[in-house]
Image (spheres, rainbow, N blue to C red):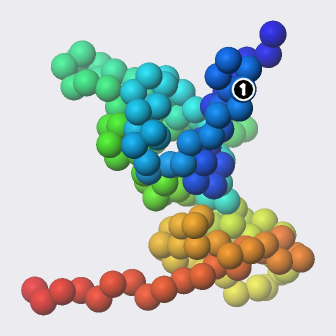
Amino acid sequence: MAQNHPTVQEDMLIYQLDERTQMITLDTSEWYTWLLTASTFTFRSPFGTFTARKERAGNNRGGWYWKAYRRRGGKLLSAYIGKLESLTIERLHAVAAQLNREDGITSSQVIYPNAPEGSPLPDLSTALYCSLARIASWNATGCATLLTRPAPAAGPG
């Protein structure tokens, strides 16, 4: 019997329960409730892919936390995601992008895999600011059209 691996794509967790497909929107109470009993899931996005695993601190005093793993070319990369309450869609995208940087993959290779040579592309900070919820569409060349907004102005200091 094939194993089913819970997978996050876009802003949705998809998994099997009693041979029925279940879907949970991330950043909801259902998502955090599911994480309480989960031990692993796969995360897929234009920023990258990784397997998330729940682990216990080595000294057994620090409680549980989530860590991301990605294997590429025989090399295992990992990154700390955080405790349960920090597993937001934005944090998952940031970790995926971090693992890609460590793997030598640029944001343009991930977000715009089929972009024409010499196309102007946003830098990684712009890409991270634009969450998947703000990706409007994929055009004919496979490039994402991002809807961006200016970063919030710094308050008086």
Report the quarter where the C terminus lies.
bottom left
Q: Which residue is painted at 76% across and 85% down in the image? A: 119
- Quick check: 109 above or below 119? above
* Residue extending farthest right: 140
Quadrant housing residue 58: top left
Residue type, numbered disc 1: Arg
Report the quarter where the N terminus lies.
top right
- Quick check: 143 above or below 23? below
Total number of numbered discs in the rendering: 1
- Quick check: 91 above or below 140? above
Nearer-the-camera pick, 119 or 84: 84
Q: Position of residue 20 (x, y in %)?
A: 72, 26
Q: Is residue 88 left or right of residue 9?
A: left
The 10 Å Cα crowd at callout 1, few under 14, some 14 to 19, many 20 or more, is: few
Q: Is residue 105 visible?
A: no
Q: Position of residue 49 (x, y in %)?
A: 64, 46
- Quick check: 117 above or below 13? below
Quadrant housing residue 29: top left
Q: Which residue is painted at 24% across and 86% down in the image? A: 154
* Residue extending farthest left: 157
Q: Is residue 102 left or right of residue 138?
A: left
Residue located beneath label 1 in the image:
20
Q: Position of residue 60 (x, y in %)?
A: 24, 16
Nearer-the-camera pick, 81 or 10: 10
Quadrant housing residue 36: top left
Q: Which residue is painted at 53% across and 73% down in the image? A: 130
Nearer-the-camera pick, 148 or 11: 11
Q: Position of residue 38 (x, y in %)?
A: 48, 25
Q: Is residue 93 visible?
A: yes
* Mark 1 residue element: strand
Q: Is residue 60 left or right of residue 136?
A: left
Nearer-the-camera pick, 64 or 115: 64
